[in-house]
Amino acid sequence: MLIRIPGVLTADELARCRNRLSTANWQDGRHSAGYLSQKVKRNAQLADTDPITRELGKLILLALDRSEAFASAALPLKIVPPLFNRYAAEQNYGNHIDGAIRPISDTPHKVRTDLSATIFIADPEDYDGGELVIQDTFGERAVKLPAGDMVLYPGTNVHRVAPVTRGVRLASFFWIQSMVRDENHRSILFQLDSAIQSLAGDVPEHRGLVDAAGVYHNLLRCWADTD
């Protein structure tokens, strides 16, 4: 299930990201790729330990904390600190699948990559190409969102980034370990929560809302793992 979450970053936060990334020490993205991905990865990336990575990663984590849509869709337990990449001059990333487990730099901790996330930082009109192309049960879906918007998708999906033929594509990317490991269970919970929120807005006094919320939380108790 692909989920778009608009407006994760504000205009001021985007401006700060662009300003800091304009002076960043970009490195060859292949250094961080696995054996197979190195063959198809052609981009630039900031090192996990770069001060700008850590500064802007904290900014994004704070933005995620205030996003109710992200909390509902991901039910996050652990988040790999956000990373940043840059595509220009025909750079691209061929078909690949994200590793199942990601370490957190300078710690003994590891995160299971239930969900992959991309937040677009460059405005879409500032570059051509650069679509995030994700394969799912309905075929391929090309994603190119306004700056500040995020896409969430299962870490099990094969995906690629199309060549950037004009301008520069800037984005942040990271992975989430969800409290609910099963993708179908997460999807059910997200759809149910969305329906409850919609009904609460339209008919806030409806007596069925409490029962629906009870079903949601009882399912969450059955399926969630907080260890």
Image (spheres, grey):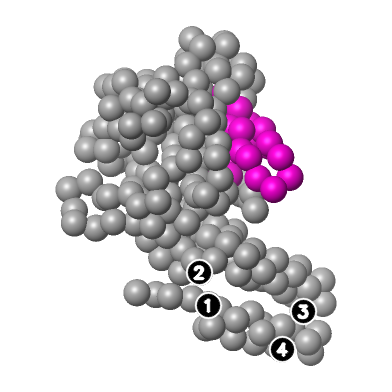
Q: Where, by quadrant of the figure, is residue 157 drawn?
A: top right
* Mark 2: few/some/many CA within 10 Å (<14, 14-19, 20+): many
- The residues tagged by marks 3 and 1 sit, at their Cα atoms, a distance apart of 27 Å
Task: Find residue 211 and name its label.
Answer: 4
Compared with 93, 101 (above or below) is below
Task: Report whether residue 66 is seen.
Answer: yes
Name the element at disc 2. Answer: loop
- The residues tagged by marks 2 and 3 sit, at their Cα atoms, a distance apart of 28 Å
Name the element at disc 3. Answer: loop
Q: Which span is picked out in magenta?
A: 130-151
Compared with 46, 5 (above or below) is below
Q: Are marks 1 and 2 in contact (CB under 8 Å)?
A: yes
Q: Pointer 1: what residue?
A: 223
Task: Find residue 180 and name its label.
Answer: 2
Task: Find residue 160 and name its label.
Answer: none
Query: Considering only order in the chain, which callout, 3 or 2, is on the residue closer to the N terminus?
Result: 2
Query: Considering only order in the chain, which callout, 1 or 3, is on the residue closer to the N terminus?
Result: 3
At label 3, the amino acid type is Pro
Query: Considering only order in the chain, which callout, 4 or 3, is on the residue closer to the N terminus?
Result: 3
Left or right: 192, with 186 as reference point: right
Image depth: mark 2 or mark 3 in front: 2
Residue 150: within the magenta?
yes
- The residues tagged by marks 4 and 2 sit, at their Cα atoms, a distance apart of 21 Å
Query: Considering only order in the chain, which callout, 2 or 1, is on the residue closer to the N terminus?
Result: 2
Left or right: 33, with 87 as reference point: left
Q: Are marks 4 and 1 in contact (CB under 8 Å)?
A: no
Q: Are marks 3 and 4 in contact (CB under 8 Å)?
A: no
Compared with 56, 86 (above or below) is above
In-front residue for pair 207/83: 83
At label 1, the amino acid type is Trp
